[in-house]
Image (cartoon, rainbow, N blue to C red):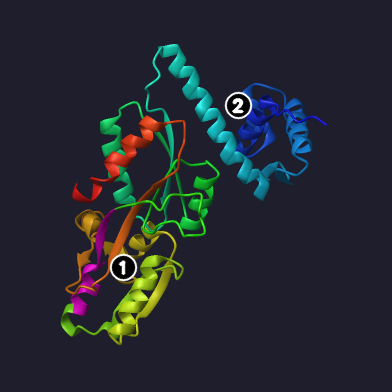
């Protein structure tokens, strides 16, 4: 049995996964479609499982294929970094860092982190992966990403991960389109205030539920979101009031045309940075870690 992975096959697999089909990948790699198709089949035989589902000319990744794609991206990113580093004769480049950002983290805050890190390390290249915290903990534990920015720490069951560094707390406020803000200022009735809420499994949603219960509020929830950016888009369209983290409140109000509502819900959201021991990209990870510690003060 052949136990040696053919990296040419892996490169071809990644091209097909990225391009979404044999023909497009063959054009990108300047090889024939039959040759590329045969290489992918050999890789599937090597792993003993299907990596793609064939849907006409379109090829979509199976669950195993998606898992393999994460490793393939890492392998070739590290390989490109190695070649670049050796050719330049230096070995202290920040290189490529794979950053996981939890869905609950404001996009503007993540952008601020990347901006500060790139100022510190101009040669840094960051590959950003978004997802739910539990998905990111799994990717971090299997070394598919280097660093996670989240509003919660890894659970105790993730014993192979450090507890993370809490770099600060963010007050949670509410903002809405001017017409909804005007209505609320006029009657101050929470039961008539339409709410856009984060998903039920999120830490922030649990804290909101606790606050509503403690204050005998029955919220009028219009919609629930995994994606904070989508929630703000609908807030801008006047669908309801949305929770906003204080460090990005001014930017959010300016960008989406929202107005802060005149009440405090007495909730603070944590901000954690979690990384594992890796022999690669230590300079880049350090640049991101240092930048993360200052983003709440920016």
Residue furthest to the bottom: 216
Q: Are marks 1 and 2 in contact (CB under 8 Å)?
A: no
Within the magenta stretch, is there residue 175?
A: yes
Q: Which residues are magenta?
A: 167-184
Residue 132 can be seen in this image? no
Relative depth, front residue between 33 and 168? 168
**Mark 2 neighbour class, 10 Å CA radius: few under 14, some 14 to 19, many 20 or more:** few
- Secondary-structure class at tag 2: helix
Q: Which mark is first along the chain, 2 or 1?
A: 2
Q: Is residue 24 left or right of residue 34?
A: left
Q: Which residue is mark 2?
A: 28
At 60% across and 40% down in the image, what residue appears? 69
Q: Residue at x 41, y 12 (%)?
A: 89
The quadrant of the picture occupied by the N terminus is: top right
Which of the 4 image quadrants contains residue 262? Answer: bottom left
Viewer-nearest residue: 258 or 167: 167
* x and y percentages locating residue 21 in the rendered image: 66, 37
Residue drawn where x is 39% and y is 75% of the image: 222
Residue lying farthest to the right in this orientation: 1
Is residue 185 inside the magenta stretch? no
**Res 274 visible:** yes
Q: Nearer the viewer, residue 227 or 209?
A: 209
Is residue 157 depicted above or below 77 in this figure?
below
- Numbered circle sitting on residue 242: 1
């Amino acid at each position: 049995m052949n136990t040696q992975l053919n990296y040419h096959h892996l490169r071809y697999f990644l091209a097909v996964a990225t391009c979404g089909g044999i023909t497009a990948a063959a054009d990108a790699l300047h090889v024939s479609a039959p040759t590329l198709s045969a290489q992918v089949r050999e890789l599937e035989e090597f792993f003993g499982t299907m990596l793609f589902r064939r849907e006409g000319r379109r090829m979509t990744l199976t669950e195993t294929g998606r898992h393999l794609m994460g490793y393939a991206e890492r392998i070739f990113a590290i390989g490109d970094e190695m070649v670049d580093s050796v050719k330049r004769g230096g070995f202290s480049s920040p290189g490529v860092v794979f950053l996981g950002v939890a869905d609950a983290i404001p996009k503007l805050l993540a952008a601020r982190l990347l901006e500060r890190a790139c100022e510190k390390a101009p040669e840094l290249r960051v590959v950003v992966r978004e997802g739910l915290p539990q998905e990111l903990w799994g990717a971090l534990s299997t070394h598919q990403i280097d660093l996670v920015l989240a509003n919660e720490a890894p659970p105790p069951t993730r014993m192979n991960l450090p507890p993370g560094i809490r770099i600060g707390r963010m007050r949670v406020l509410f903002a809405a389109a001017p017409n909804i803000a005007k209505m609320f200022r006029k009657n101050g009735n929470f039961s008539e205030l339409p709410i856009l809420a984060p998903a039920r499994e999120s830490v922030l949603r649990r804290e909101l539920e606790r606050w509503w219960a403690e204050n005998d509020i029955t919220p009028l929830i219009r919609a629930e979101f995994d994606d904070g950016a989508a929630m703000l888009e609908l807030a801008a369209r006047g669908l309801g009031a949305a929770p906003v983290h204080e460090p990005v409140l001014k930017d959010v109000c300016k960008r989406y045309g929202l107005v802060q509502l005149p009440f405090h819900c007495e909730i603070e959201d944590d901000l954690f940075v979690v990384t594992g021991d890796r022999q690669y990209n230590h300079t880049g990870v350090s640049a991101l870690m240092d930048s993360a510690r200052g983003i709440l003060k920016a």
